[in-house]
Image (cartoon, rainbow, N blue to C red):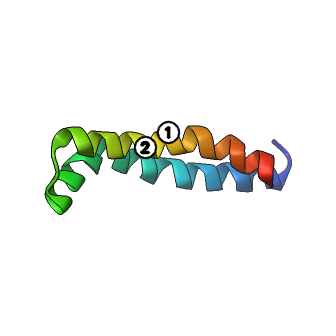
Amino acid sequence: MKSPQVWLVSLYAGLMFVPTTGFGQLWGVPYFVERFDIEKDAAGFMVSMIFFGWAIGGPLYGWVF
């Protein structure tokens, strides 16, 4: 907790997490349905890919870099 780098990384992670979950969980499906005129099932699948990308991309990015 004394390291400034820990605070910087925590702030960055929080600023990335909150907007993505807010969009994905609250407004993602209605946005895709209205904007792209697709069915709710397809919009739900698209929004779930956001979180699937987190699950796969986070560890993969850490492993690569």
Tell me the quarter of the image containing the N terminus: top right
Tell me the quarter of the image containing the C terminus: bottom right
Please tell me which residue is depicted at 60% across the width and 40% down the height of the picture.
56
In terms of secondary structure, where does tag 1 sit? helix
User: Which numbered tag is attached to residue 52?
Assistant: 1
Quarter of the view holding residue 16? bottom right
Residue 55 at x, y percent in the picture: 58, 37
Q: Are marks 2 and 1 in contact (CB under 8 Å)?
A: yes
Residue 29 at x, y percent in the picture: 24, 46
In terms of secondary structure, where does tag 2 sit? helix
Query: Which of 61/14 is in front?
Result: 61
Q: Is residue 38 left or right of residue 54?
A: left
Please tell me which residue is depicted at 22% across the width and 38% down the height of the picture.
41
Query: Which of 53/6 is in front?
Result: 53
Residue 42 at x, y percent in the picture: 25, 43
User: Which numbered tag is attached to residue 49?
Assistant: 2
Quarter of the view holding residue 49? top left
Please tell me which residue is depicted at 28% across the width and 40% down the height of the picture.
44
